[in-house]
Image (tube, rainbow, N blue to C red):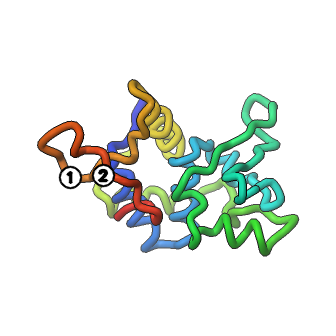
Amino acid sequence: MTGWLWPEQVFALIAQAGKIDTEFRLLLIACTWCGLRLSEALGLACDDVRLAEAFAWLRDTKNGEPQPVHLPPPSWSPSSLIIRAGSKRPGERVFRFAKGGHVYSLLRVAAFRAEITLPRRQAFHLLRHTYATSKTPYHRHFLTLAASPPTTHSSRLAPLPMEGGS
């Protein structure tokens, strides 16, 4: 089964992640708003983030080819770890987490608290599917939708909260 999250689910998940750990919250934002695989986000080097251009360079990807990544808000908002890391931690990775049981446990706890059932064997990849789903069918960013059900289609569009919604 291929899954993805609705905007209100993304915002709830990110809000719960922030209650657990601020950096974990920012990891989920980066995975969701930039479409990064967990391994790509965890391997992102501070030196490869160019905030003035809202750009990051992924040196290590699944297919072995480097890849440019646009950093839309809120992935580089003024309070984000990426800004702090990019300017104050040269030579280090943006995120301190390692790919393993701890980071997956954090996701399960955040999902449980947000009342989200994660599809079996998808975990973080669900965020990548959410990113891809957000790009179809009209090339509007799915995550800019208001969390509450609208009365008309035009009222669904709302600015994306810089802090990832709540």
* Residue at figure coordinates x 53%, y 56% from the top left: 73
Local crowd at mark 1 within 10 Å, few (<14), some, or many (≥20)?
Answer: few
What amino acid type is highlighted by mark number 1?
Ser
Q: Which mark is residue 148?
A: 1
User: Does residue 77 appear anywhere in the picture?
Assistant: yes
Q: Quadrant of the C terminus?
A: bottom left
Residue assigned mark 2: 8
Q: Where 136 falls versus 125 (above or below)?
A: above
Q: Where 22 falls versus 160 (above or below)?
A: below
The Cα atoms of the two marked residues, 1 and 2, are separated by 7 Å
Q: Which mark is residue 61?
A: none
What amino acid type is highlighted by mark number 2?
Glu
**161 or 65: nearer the eye?**
161
Q: Are marks 1 and 2 in contact (CB under 8 Å)?
A: yes
User: Residue 3 appears at what percent x and percent y?
Assistant: 40, 34
Sequence-first disc among 1 and 2? 2
**Quarter residue 82 falls in:** bottom right
* Residue at figure coordinates x 75%, y 66% from the top left: 86
User: Residue 44 appears at what percent x and percent y?
Assistant: 74, 53
**Could you tell me which secondary element the residue under label 1 belongs to?**
loop
User: Does residue 102 appear anywhere in the picture?
Assistant: no
**160 or 104: nearer the eye?**
160
